[in-house]
Amino acid sequence: MVAPLRIALAGLGTVGAGVIRLVEANADLIARRAGRPIVVTVVGARDRNKDRGVDLSPYAWEDDMVIMGEREDVDVVVELVGGSDGPALSCARTTIEAGKALVTANKAMIAHHGLELAAKAEAAKVALKFEAAVAGGIPVIKALREGAAANAIERVYGILNGTCNYILSTMEDTGRGFGEVLSEAQAKGYAEADPAFDVEGTDAAHKLSILAAIAFGSKLDFAAVETSGITRLTAADIAQADALGYVIRLIGMADTEAHNGSQRLFQRVQPHLVPFDHPLAHVDGATNAVVAEGNFSGRLLFQGAGAGEGPTASAVVADLIDIARGEVGTPFSVPVAELEAMAPAGAGQRQGRAYIRFMVADRPGALAEITAAMRDAGVSIESLIQKGRAADSGAVMVAMVTHEGPESAVSEAVRLLKGSDSLLEAPLVLQILGD
Amino acid sequence: MVAPLRIALAGLGTVGAGVIRLVEANADLIARRAGRPIVVTVVGARDRNKDRGVDLSPYAWEDDMVIMGEREDVDVVVELVGGSDGPALSCARTTIEAGKALVTANKAMIAHHGLELAAKAEAAKVALKFEAAVAGGIPVIKALREGAAANAIERVYGILNGTCNYILSTMEDTGRGFGEVLSEAQAKGYAEADPAFDVEGTDAAHKLSILAAIAFGSKLDFAAVETSGITRLTAADIAQADALGYVIRLIGMADTEAHNGSQRLFQRVQPHLVPFDHPLAHVDGATNAVVAEGNFSGRLLFQGAGAGEGPTASAVVADLIDIARGEVGTPFSVPVAELEAMAPAGAGQRQGRAYIRFMVADRPGALAEITAAMRDAGVSIESLIQKGRAADSGAVMVAMVTHEGPESAVSEAVRLLKGSDSLLEAPLVLQILGD
């Protein structure tokens, strides 16, 4: 047996403890599959004395995770500290500069600094891997970077945030409202005390920007992701979607469009109406799922647990096994210097069907005003429902589904209605996921 | 740019033509991702003059595919001849013996000779890759071998034959019988003129045996797969399953069980009742899907087109890109010498719920005889339906679902009923897919 691959773990939260448990529990099969043992040699975290439910006595303790990669007894640093900057980024930089491989589950850091780190890793000829940063235990980075590598990817999209999916599918199952279900999810530990990062779509946007860079060979561009979350969705929206044959899911969607001879990159995180017969309509609870549509493979779907100790540790250790097998590769699907800088594509050019929901004052003329705006903007209405007044408010819900048409027309209709006394709040516009 | 990877194509059927189209259409992106161009240099097939819809003039023609690997202008041979033995096997052997890499879509050859070929490839230090042999365009071999490599796989199962799935989901949608739907599938080209290989489960069994070897690190053992097909399923079975909350899918299922300190391998291809809320219940048409349950990852699902020119070519070229990137690896998840020889596990020790359907003579006592046999064998019945006599026969259908219990008890009940005058045919026993 050749020398073991020696791991330093920076960060000992849930995932760090999971990596230790996994490497211990599956040590024999990992050694057989990797061709050499994978052993943790060094660990470090902010607080040495916290009980993490795993025995840390076999491992050297390193207070300063920034210098872990410089230690002689370390081949790979696994960064599980979190946060886009700060200690995580310092640790990543010094590790790569020390000529050691880096594995990370840190989507925020890759979304913000992935290009810089990848360029450094390529220059140092060391591996930089981040399978665990997107969709937890699902090996979707590998699937896109390698499994679907023969394809021009036409579209990549999916359910990238387990907390949002848990909330939406629970609202669907129980008929309860967003706030109530969020509180319950927080009580159960499925949602953070500060849930903004998840429910406002930022976490999904981090992951989408990473997927898009790999799928399209484009320069990672997190800042260009149009992001909206699930906080405005009501039980009535979910019920209305259901009546129309849809579920609502927070979808991260990316594709490219030709523009004056070059490619523009479209990236958006937004709740979508998903038709019952689409595979993503059956993705419930904290599950994640990613669809990649290749020009030869057709539609590929990858589904599994999007977070959690075991699944995330599974992805981290898969990266370690690749490194132990001698794979260096490029962090993205092509070397960083060959990633294309693509300008952001706005939504205006896109065609699609939309769900538009208005909360209107219950008085004559409101519906006429809305439908006139639709007509003037050239939006063709496929179906429209006005729901009787809620008992405890003067608000009436008007929900419509449009025919296929330009998104710009819907935006124009919304603009025309801006400031209308008939509307009690801004209209909610959701895209309908098309084939 | 480094030297191109030069490919010889042995076999120019649908998939061969697809590989040529793919390599031409996506040449630029493949070169960027692989780090070098991938070019076809040599082609060969039985009939040189057949029109295949692709221009073969740029390529050298080689009549004898067995010597393709010996040519100086070839780095990798892609074997797409088909058949477990004969020219395909000769081509594979001579290619590897010549020190060249082999990529194949040939599930029958890998199921029968995969161990021999893998041992030869390891000895010659060349790549042997067969992503396209299982589940078409879905990169499931890679997902199991690499993406889920950190896990002890507890169970691997899925929908592995698109023809059967097309027939079953069409029966479900239309209420028509097996024979009628099969004829239509043949007319549309979704099923072969001789459909036995598909509808009797052999094709799925080939794929299952390959998946099992990779998932469990066991010696590939195609002969041990218990196989039954879909030919006995009737429209009434589909309707009855639907009424109970299930669809019927042909499932290949493999897992291991401890026995006297070693592991036994269970492999079975059989129609199963799949609960509506299971992701496989929503896999329709010619789609394939594979589920792998890892001890840390939890349930992973991979879904996509299981066959066809584009998807299969996508998988073939993904293997070529891996080879161009310099990956050799082992054909299975561990070296052949380390694959465990596992004795086959019979179904007798298994626990589960079953659907049992009887066609009985319409006369007093038949139901009493069946239920007595269940009682005597210790089978506990959860629900039972007797359907009125069909208009054109004297047969009555009795369908039941059992409580969780040993499969051996169901087999015993069937044995007790053997030779009974009440039964017009042997009972049909299908397992219910459990969590």
Image (tube, coloured by chain):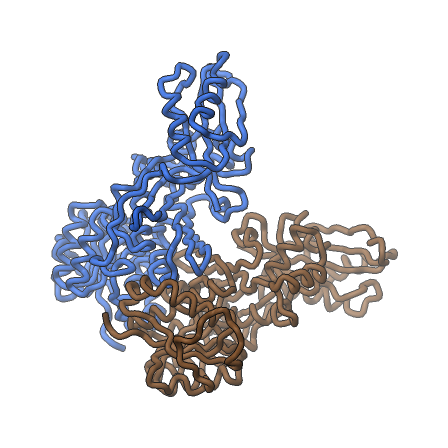
Chain colours: A blue, B brown
| Residue B395 in which image quadrant | bottom right
User: In the image, residue B203 lies at what x, y percent?
Assistant: 57, 70
Quadrant occupied by the N terminus of chain B: bottom left
* Residue B147 picture quarter: bottom left
In this orientation, which residue lies closer to the viewer: B404 or B7?
B7
Is A48 on the left or on the right of B405, as rendered? left
Q: Where residue A350 sits: x, y (%)?
A: 39, 40
In the shown orientation, is residue B82 left or right of residue B359? left
Looking at the image, can residue A20 be seen? no
Dividing the picture into quarters, in which one does residue A314 lie? bottom left
Tell me which residue sits at (48%, 41%) in the image.
A274
Residue B49 in view: yes
Q: How many marks?
A: 0
Specify the farthest residue to the top: A364
Question: In this rendering, would A31 be left or right of B387?
Answer: left
Q: Is residue A17 above or below residue A416?
A: below
Query: With B266 as the anchor, is B248 left or right in this view?
Result: right
Residue name at image x 42 percent, y 64 percent: B314
- Which x, y percent locates residue A159? 40, 45
Depicted A91 relative to depicted B232: above or below: above
Write the residue at 43% across / 39% down.
Answer: A351
Closer to the camera in the image, A157 or B143:
A157
Q: Position of residue B376 (x, y in %)?
A: 73, 62
Residue in the foreground of this view, choosing between B32 and A139 = B32
